[in-house]
Amino acid sequence: MSRRITRVLVVEDDTTLHETLAEVSVDEGHDVRAAAHGREALEHLDGWEPDVILLDLMMPTMDAFAFRARQQQLGIAAASQTIVISAAHNLEAAAERLEADGWIAKPFGLDQVVGMVDRLLERAS
Amino acid sequence: MPFDPASSKEDVSEEAPSPHGTDELLRLLVDAVEDYAIFVLAPDGHVLTWNPGAERAKGYTAGEIIGRHFSVFYTPEERDAGRPAWLLGQAAEHGRVEDEGWRVRKDGTRFWADVILTAIRDRSGTLLGVAKITRDLTERRQAQEQEQRLLAEQHAREAAEEALNERDRFLSIASHELKTPVAILQLAAEQLLRAADSGRLDETRLTTGTRRILRSTQRLTALVDELLDVSALSREQGPVTRTPTDVVALVEEVVARFADAAGPDRIRVEAPETATVGGDPSRLDQVITNLVDNALKYSPSDEPVEVRVVDEPDRVGIIVADRGIGLEEATEARLFEAFSRGANAGHVPGLGLGLFITHQIVERHGGRIEGGAGPDGVGATFRVWLPKDVA
C-alpha cells in the first residue's frame, strides 16, 4: 500500500493490554497513541485524526457509548474506522449501537487485530 | 318461646296491616335464608330452633338436632378446651361475641366458620337464649389461602429472577475480568514469537513480554482464588472454629507483607502489645489483608494508610483508614454485597468480592463491620469489631 503511515488510537482502560496493543501497532509500523478512557481519547482527537480507533467497551470515567456520542456530537474523527474490543457477551449488538466498523471479542490473537485493521483500511482507501 | 308470633301481634297491626305478624315474617325470612345457619340456643346451650341454612351448613335436620347441645358442632380439641361454654358465657356477659374457626358437620367433615352469638333477653333482662348465626367461610378461606400461595409463588419467582440477574451480572463481570488477562497472555506470547521469527527479539522485548505474561497469570490466579473463596465460604456453615488469636500480631504480619509494594512508611500501625480474640487466624488474616489492600488500591500512593487496633474489655477493633477516593453514598449502601463496585472505583482489577468475603468472615465470627467516610470527610474508614469471648 502506497500511502502515509497509518494512525491508530488505542482506547483501553487496562494498562497492560493497551501497552501491548500499542506495541503491536508500532511493530506494524503504525503511528500509535493510547488512552485509558473516552475522555483521554477525546483529548487525543483534538487536532489529530486517526485512521483506526481500537475502542474498549467498559471503561471508567467515560465508556465507549459516552465517547462515541461526544465524538459524533463534536463531529471529530468522522472518517476514522472504529473497532470495538470487549469481553461482553452482547458485543455485536453493542458494536451496532456504537455504529462501529468492526468488533473483536476478547481474548483475541494478534493476527485478528492486525488483520481487521488492514481490512478496514483497505476498504476505506 | 322467643319467636312466638303471638307476642307482638298488636304492635304490628297498628303499624303495618298484614295477613302475618312481623314475627311470622321474621320466621319466614329465617326459614328462607340458606347461606346462613340461623338458630337459637337455650341459655345452657341446647338447640331450640333450626333453619334450612343451618341444615345446609351442618348437615343435621331440625328433628335430629333440636334438643341436643350445640357443642356437637365443635372439634374435639375445642370441646376439650371448653370453647363452646366460654363462647356462651361471653355472649351472656357482653351481649355479643364473634368467633372464627373450624366447625364439624354431621358427617364429621370440617368447615371454616364465622360465628356470631347474640344474647336474647326479655324486658326484665332475663336471658332467654342465645341467637347463633354461622356462615361457612371455607371457600373464602380457600380463596385467601390460594391468594397467599400465589403471592408466595410470585415472591419465589421474583427471588429466582433476582438470582438469575445476579448470576448474569456475575458472568459479565467474571468474563470481563478473566478474558482481559487471557487476551494479554495471548497477545504477549504471539508478539514474542513474531519478534523471534523476524529476528527482532532483543532483551527488552523478551523481558517486557515475559513480565506481562507473568503478571497476567498472577492476575488470573488471584481471580480464581477469589472465586474459590466465595464458594468455600458459602459451603462452610455455622460459626468458625475459634482459637485464641492475637490481632496485633496478625496486623503486623499483613503490614509486613504489603511493605514492599506499598513503600516503607506508607502503612502506619497504632496498636497495643496484644489484643486477643477467639477466631480463625487465617480468615482474620484475610479480613485485615482485604481492608489494607483496598485502602492501598483506592488511595494515592503518596497518602498514608492507617491501621489501628483497639483493645476494649469485651471486643477488639481493627480500624483501617485511607485518604483516597472515599465512598459515594450509593456505594455505601451496597458496600458488602457481592459484585458491587463503587461507581468512582474506576477500573481496579478484581471481581468486587473482597468486601463481600470480608463481611461474611466477620459475621461468622459474631463481629460487626462498618465502612464510611474518614473523620474529616476525606477517604474511607473501615471498622471491624470482633468479640473476645472464645465460644
Image: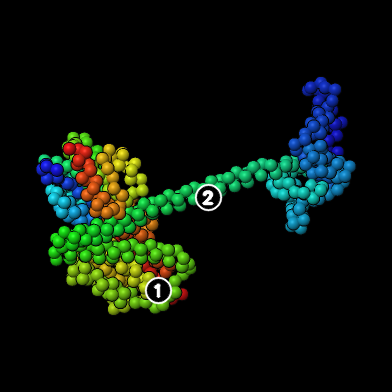
The crowding category of the residue bearing disc 2, from other C-alpha atoms within 10 Å (few below 14, some 14 to 19, many at least 20), is few
Q: Residue at x 70, y 49 (%)?
A: B101
Q: Are marks 2 and 1 in contact (CB under 8 Å)?
A: no
Foreground: disc 2 or disc 1 = 2
Q: Chain of mark 1?
A: B
Instruction: For residue B80, say whether it is visible.
Output: yes
Residue picked out by circle 1: B280
Occupied quadrant, residue A77 = top left
Q: Nearer the viewer, residue B99 or A17?
A: A17
Q: Chain of mark 2?
A: B
Q: Check if mark 2 and mark 1 are on a common chain.
A: yes
Q: Residue at x 14, y 61 (%)?
A: B199
What amino acid is found at the position of numbered circle 2 in the picture? Answer: Ala
Q: Residue at x 53, y 46 (%)?
A: B154
Q: Nearer the viewer, residue B376 or A1?
A: A1
Task: Locate residue B26, reporting x and y percent.
Answer: 80, 31
What amino acid is found at the position of numbered circle 1 in the picture? Answer: Asp
Q: Answer with mark 2 or mark 1, whichever residue precedes in sequence.
A: 2
Q: Which mark is residue B156?
A: 2
**B382 w.r.t. B16: above or below:** below
Q: Nearer the viewer, residue B137 or A112?
A: A112
